[in-house]
Image (spheres, rainbow, N blue to C red):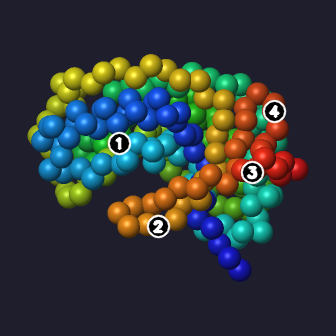
């Protein structure tokens, strides 16, 4: 039985990726670079539900059930807010960007989780907190730098009208993400990559 490591996430348009790249370029000029392994902008995303190892033959069921769960959700504006340590300042693991609206992100995560549960697929028990990973700490401890004092150019809000089922595959220096399916909000149909409907 072949398994795929998969998760649901929000991806960003090229313009936003360029703006995030500018953020990283600014951050690299600070003391943070001694602590952080930066995420390439084309790999940045917001995880909604992490599934992990999924039998390949379950992909269609996951896509179909999730489509039903979220298809009536409206598109929304995603706001890029402040930098923060995740999951918290005392025990940081990643440098992240806090995003809003958390209520819409949490609701979407819960609906996807409920869809997965109906298929007897386990989901994470930890409380959901939407965030965008900018980089991962390479060693213990928090750099002695106040994040709010870093001058970053504001990134305009973007409209989120699609989410993606991604496959995560290890590669040198990190993970490679391959879109397997795209789910469109506000009642439109799920499209398989390559233009075929999964239903």
Query: Splitting the image into 4 quarters, where does residue 60 fall?
Result: bottom right
Q: Is residue 166 above or below residue 163?
A: below
Dot 2 or dot 3: first in sequence order is: 2
Tags 1 and 2 in contact by the CB under 8 Å rule? no
The residue depicted at 40 percent of the width and 42 percent of the height is 41
Residue occupying the point 50% across, 50% down: 126
Q: Earlier in the sequence, mark 4 or mark 1?
A: 1
Question: Percent position (x, y) of residue 101?
Answer: 53, 25
- The answer to whether residue 198 is seen in the rendering is yes
Mark in front: 2 vs 3: 3
- Assign a secondary structure to mark 3: loop
Name the residue tied to disc 1.
134
Instruction: Identify residue for label 3.
Output: 194
Camera-near label (1 vs 2) is 2
| Numbered tag placed on residue 25 in the rendering | none
Of callouts 1 and 2, the N-terminal one:
1
Q: Secondary structure at mark 2?
A: strand
Q: Earlier in the sequence, mark 1 or mark 3?
A: 1
Dot 2 alpha-carbon crowd within 10 angstroms: few under 14, some 14 to 19, many 20 or more: few
- Residue visible at 70% across and 70% down? 55
> Are discs 1 and 3 less than 8 Å apart at CB?
no
Observer-side mark, 1 or 3, equals: 3
Residue under numbered circle 4: 188
Using the numbered discs, state the Cα–Cα distance from disc 1 to disc 2 in whole angstroms: 19 Å
- Quarter of the image where the N terminus is located: bottom right
Which residue has dot 2 on it? 170
Give coordinates of residue 98: x percent, y percent: 40, 32
Using the rendered view, name the quadrant where residue 108 is placed.
Answer: top right
Residue at mark 4 to residue at mark 3: CA–CA distance: 17 Å
Query: For the point 15% across and 37% down, which residue is it?
Result: 29
Asked which quadrant contains residue 111, the reply is top right
């Amino acid at each position: 039985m072949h398994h795929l490591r998969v998760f649901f996430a929000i991806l960003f348009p090229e313009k936003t990726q360029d703006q995030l790249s500018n953020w990283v370029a600014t951050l690299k000029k600070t003391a943070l670079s001694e602590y952080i392994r930066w995420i390439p902008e084309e790999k940045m995303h917001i995880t909604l539900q992490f599934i992990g190892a999924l039998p390949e033959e379950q992909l269609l069921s996951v896509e179909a059930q999730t489509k039903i769960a979220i298809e009536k959700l409206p598109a929304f504006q995603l706001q890029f807010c402040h930098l923060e340590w995740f999951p918290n300042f005392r025990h940081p693991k990643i440098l992240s960007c806090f995003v809003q609206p958390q209520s819409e992100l949490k609701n979407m995560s819960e609906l996807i989780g409920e869809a997965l549960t109906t298929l007897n697929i386990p989901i994470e028990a930890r409380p959901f907190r939407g965030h965008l990973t900018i980089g991962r700490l390479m060693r213990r401890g928090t750099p002695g730098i106040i994040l709010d004092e870093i001058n970053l150019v504001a990134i305009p809000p973007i409209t989120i009208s699609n989410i993606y089922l991604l496959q995560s595959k290890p590669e040198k220096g990190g993970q490679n993400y391959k879109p397997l399916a795209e789910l469109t909000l506000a009642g439109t149909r799920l499209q398989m990559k390559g233009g075929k409907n999964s239903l």
